[in-house]
Image (tube, rainbow, N blue to C red):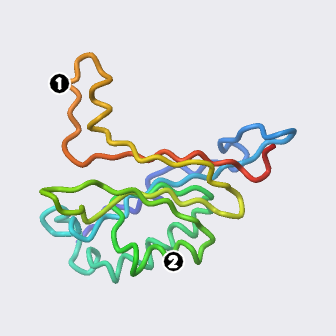
């Protein structure tokens, strides 16, 4: 059975000298960023992913590969979507890689807490968390003139973290 290529096989590698940087005091600081939809267990079904085998959809198979992908990325900031298994997996594994993590709450459906969330993980040796806020995108809708055309569906959140690089003034 043919499987879709891995994400890293689809992207063009970026030369380290061309990565995004900002000026901090008198020298540039490279920022390595990763955004990763880790696929929540409740969505890891053949109905949603018919090209994947049962083994590939099983969390026990995916979990070590997800952590290895994050480790190999070298990112100091990681933005995660569809995150579940926080208490029994991600929290410990991300901390073992040197990350501090700010978790969002995806909202609720029918009064029940949603089963997956979003998170921002940052290398604590490089970043200091200044502030954080969870944004309900349903509330953002009212900011648009034609707000009926701005429909994201229920339980859509975004997270904002203000981080200070430890090398900046």
Q: Say which residue appears at 32% left-offset and 32% top-offset.
A: 140
Which of disc 2 and disc 1 is earlier in sequence?
Answer: 2
Mark 1 and mark 2: Cα distance apart in space: 42 Å
Secondary structure at numbered mark 2: helix
Image position, residue 44 (x, y; %):
23, 69
The numbered dot on residue 83 is none
Image position, residue 155 (x, y; %):
24, 49
Q: Residues within 10 Å of mark 2 (few under 14, many from 20)?
A: some
Pointer 1 with pointer 2, Cβ within 8 A:
no
Against 163, residue 37 (above or below) is below
Which residue is labeled 2 in the image?
93
Front position in the image: 5 or 140: 140
Instruction: Between label 1 and label 2, give the one nearer the viewer.
Output: 1
Front position in the image: 137 or 63: 137
The numbered dot on residue 148 is 1
- For residue 95, side relative to residue 7 (left or right): right
- For residue 98, side relative to residue 89 (left or right): right
Give residue 100's quadrant in the image. Answer: bottom right
Q: Say which residue appears at 25% left-offset and 66% top-offset.
A: 115
Front position in the image: 127 or 16: 127
How many numbered badges does the structure rendering display? 2
- For residue 89, side relative to residue 13 (left or right): left
* Residue sitting farthest toward the front: 111
């Amino acid at each position: 059975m043919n499987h879709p290529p891995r994400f890293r096989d689809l992207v063009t590698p970026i030369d380290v000298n061309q990565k995004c940087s900002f000026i901090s005091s008198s020298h540039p600081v490279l920022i390595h960023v990763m955004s990763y939809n880790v696929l929540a267990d409740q969505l890891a079904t053949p109905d949603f992913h018919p090209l994947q085998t049962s083994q590939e959809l099983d969390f026990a198979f995916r979990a070590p590969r997800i952590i290895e992908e994050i480790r190999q990325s070298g990112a100091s900031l990681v933005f995660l979507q569809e995150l579940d298994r926080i208490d029994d997996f991600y929290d410990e594994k991300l901390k073992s890689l040197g990350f501090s993590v700010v978790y969002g709450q995806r909202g609720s459906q029918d009064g029940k807490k949603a089963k997956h969330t979003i998170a921002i993980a940052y290398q604590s040796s490089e970043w200091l968390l200044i502030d954080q806020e969870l944004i309900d995108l349903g509330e953002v809708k009212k900011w648009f003139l034609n707000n009926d055309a701005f429909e994201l569906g229920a339980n859509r959140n975004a997270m904002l973290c203000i981080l200070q690089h430890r090398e900046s003034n």
